């Protein structure tokens, strides 16, 4: 019974690894647009806007730009690593290649 319920939902799981790259690109695009002033307007918080606001104070308070920049980097990295991990876990072609290599 559980095989019947799991099998139809498996093709839908392939969407998650494929969506990792566009999600990373969207995070970077939003931060870049906010950095140049074309993103979210001032009442809404944005990491790109925080980096832009903090660049005027780099000599005194470098963390005002550094911390949002590091957060952008960590978000993009984590989305990419989760997408790669899901791809490795859910791709049947990759799984059979690993099984064949370990059987030798």
Image (cartoon, helix red, strand yellow):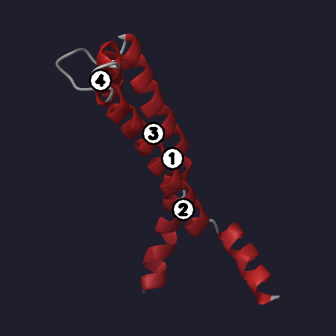
Looking at the image, which residue is at 45% across and 39% down?
73
Dot 2 falls on a residue whose secondary structure is: helix
Looking at the image, which residue is at 21% across and 15% down?
42
Dot 4 falls on a residue whose secondary structure is: helix
The answer to whether mark 1 and mark 2 are in CB contact below 8 A is: no
Horizontal and vertical percent for residue 16? 49, 54
The answer to whether mark 3 and mark 1 are in CB contact below 8 A is: no
Q: Mark 2 — residue?
A: 85
Q: Mark 3 — residue?
A: 73
Q: Mark 1 — residue?
A: 20
Horizontal and vertical percent for residue 82? 48, 56
Horizontal and vertical percent for residue 96? 72, 76
The answer to whether mark 4 and mark 3 are in CB contact below 8 A is: no
Side (left or right) of 83 relative to 60: right
* Sequence-wise first label, 1 or 2: 1
Q: Residue furthest front?
A: 60
Q: Mark 4 — residue?
A: 50
Residue neighbourhood size for the residue with mark 2, other residues' Cα within 10 Å, grouped as few (<14), some (14–19), many (≥20)? few
* Sequence-wise first label, 4 or 1: 1
Image quadrant for the C terminus? bottom right
How far, Cα to Cα, is label 1 from label 2? 10 Å
The answer to whether mark 3 and mark 2 are in CB contact below 8 A is: no
């Amino acid at each position: 019974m559980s095989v019947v319920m799991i099998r139809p939902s498996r093709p839908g799981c392939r969407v998650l690894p494929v969506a990792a790259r566009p999600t990373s690109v969207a995070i970077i695009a939003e931060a870049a647009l906010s950095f140049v002033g074309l993103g979210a307007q001032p009442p809404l918080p944005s990491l790109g806007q925080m980096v832009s606001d903090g660049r005027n104070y780099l000599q005194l308070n470098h963390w005002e730009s550094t911390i949002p920049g590091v957060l952008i980097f960590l978000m993009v990295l984590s989305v990419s690593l989760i997408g790669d991990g899901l791809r490795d876990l859910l791709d049947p072609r990759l799984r059979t290649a690993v099984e064949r290599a370990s059987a030798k």
